[in-house]
Image (cartoon, grey):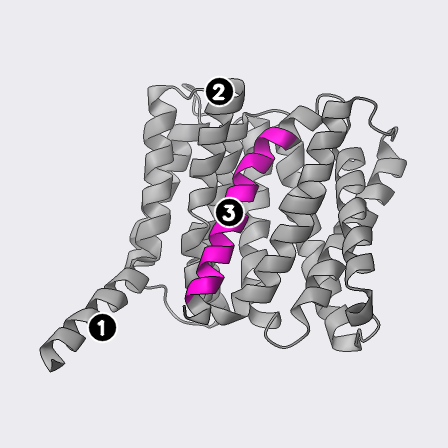
Amino acid sequence: MKKQHQADLALLGVTLAWGISFILTKNSLESLETFNFLGIRFLISAVTSALFFYKRLMKLDRTTLKYGLLIGVIMFSGYATQTIGLNYTTASKSGFITGFSVVIVPIFSAVVLRKLPKFSSIIGVVSAIIGLGMLTLDANLQLNIGDFYTLIGAVCFAMHIITVGKYAVQVDSINLAILQIGVVGILSTIVSFLFETPVMPAAGSDWFSILFLAFVCTSGAFIVQNAVQKYTSTTHTALIFTGEPVFSAIFAYILIGEVMNNRGIIGSILIVAGMIVAEIDFDLSFFKAKKGKVIEE
């Protein structure tokens, strides 16, 4: 199996883990404040990752440190706004709004590269924006505050995908991932002590959620993403991440019986359709290559 295919499969596993993370996070927020929860989750993840890869961390250089701090701040912004939003919206809606980041990626990439976005990206963005409106706006065309925070988080996660794709190929990807996780943990803890009343979880169910999120959805997921994304393209990564909101909706239905209304379902379908259409060139190039191969034969 080619390295690119292995990388794509690994990223699919990451997407599955992030899909269930919305439910576990929402459950944890019932007993913990936002940054208290994030601080515990990401510090546990950072410390265990650092202990496991301590030999690599001993070789940490200034360039990796610089990129890790930059991407870490972006990641903190994404998780902070997304988690605040989860206090006021549903897990399934949060998943689909967060998935909107996939549509933003090609647009941001075009801006950074100073090129006009491809036609499929424009169509995808239009479809996703219409779907986002159907999913989040009420009858009075007002946006829920939780959905608004989550949308800001989606923009931050789009920047995270782009910056990881740009810098992970230049430095040690494992060290880069650990630094990002550590930055989120430290900043969350500082904010928690400044504005919250931090406590340690008491219930076993809270600890299960936090440890699963720390080890599987944070350490495992981000180390895998940073390690394998260098073997695939940003477009491939964004396309695979379109599965995250779908998984979040499935898990929300199975685990807590969360069901969307018809308008929300249509909006969600338009968002996912927009994500796929925005990356359609990947599929077209694949079929063109296949067609060319058949002609040659």
Q: Which residues are magenta?
A: 5-24
Q: Position of residue 162 (x, y in %)?
A: 54, 63
Which residue is drawn at the image coordinates 51% and 49% (left, top)? 13
Which residue is drawn at the image coordinates 80% and 39% (left, top)? 40
Q: Quadrant of residue 88?
A: top right
| Residue on which the image places disc 1 | 289
Which residue is drawn at the image coordinates 28% and 61% (left, top)? 283
Instruction: Give the quadrant of the C terminus.
Output: bottom left
| Residue on which the image places disc 3 | 15
> Residue 16 vs residue 214: left or right?
left
> Which residue is more in the foreground, 255 or 25?
255
**Secondary element at tag 2:** loop
- Whichever of labels 3 and 2 marks the residue nearer the N terminus, that label is 3
- Whichever of labels 1 and 3 marks the residue nearer the N terminus, that label is 3
State whether the magenta stretch is mostly helix, strand or loop: helix
Label for residue 258?
A: 2
Disc 1 marks which amino acid? Ala
> Which residue is more in the foreground, 12 or 184?
12
**Secondary element at tag 1:** helix
State the CA–CA distance, disc 1 to disc 3. Answer: 27 Å
Reply above or below: 160 against 63.
above
